[in-house]
Image (tube, rainbow, N blue to C red):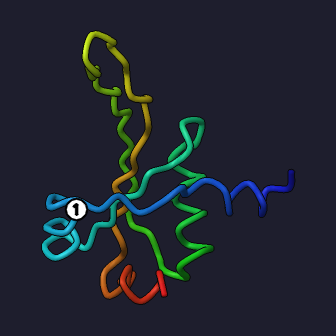
Amino acid sequence: MSSQERLMNVLLSPHVSEKGARLQEQSNQVVFRVRPDADKDEIRRAVELMFEVKVAEVRVMNVKGKSKRFGQTTGRRSDWKKAYVKLAEGQSIDMIGSEG
């Protein structure tokens, strides 16, 4: 797999939440679900490639899956990784427009 193909597969989806919406309004940050093996530099390059914006900072976080019960059976959701991407001054990503 070439590095260009790899970058296209780093971002899995935007992570939609109240906190994410607040961060986008106040701090010009966007939250993404990313591949568990992705590093900060790959995430930065993937966002810059796919959305044609300049990234100022990337912070990553491993999210532990929750334990859930289904009757007597206990299960566990998968662990996943999310990235908080701060865009450079004057840059923005229109999530609503990009999904159509």
Q: Residue at x 35, y 58 (%)?
A: 15
Relative side of 75 to 27, left or right: right
Q: Residue at x 15, y 58 (%)?
A: 19
Amino acid type, callout 1 = Gly
Quarter of the image where one finds residue 20: bottom left
Quarter of the image where one finds residue 95: bottom left
Looking at the image, residue 92 lies above or below residue 27: below
The picture places residue 42, in percent across and down from the top left corner, at 60, 52
Q: Which residue lies most toward the right here? A: 1
Badge 1 crowding class, 10 Å Cα cut-off, few under 14, some 14 to 19, many 20 or more, is some
Looking at the image, residue 52 lies above or below residue 41: below
Quarter of the image where one finds residue 62: top left
The picture places residue 16, in percent across and down from the top left corner, at 29, 62
Relative side of 25 to 40, left or right: left
The picture places residue 99, in percent across and down from the top left corner, at 47, 81
Q: Which residue lies most toward the top here? A: 72
Q: Which residue is mark 1?
A: 20
Q: Residue at x 22, y 72 (%)?
A: 24
Q: Nearer the viewer, residue 35 or 45?
A: 35
Looking at the image, residue 77 lies above or below residue 96: above
Q: Residue at x 56, y 51 (%)?
A: 41
The picture places residue 18, in percent across and down from the top left corner, at 15, 61
Dot 1: what SS?
helix
Q: Nearer the viewer, residue 11 or 57?
A: 11
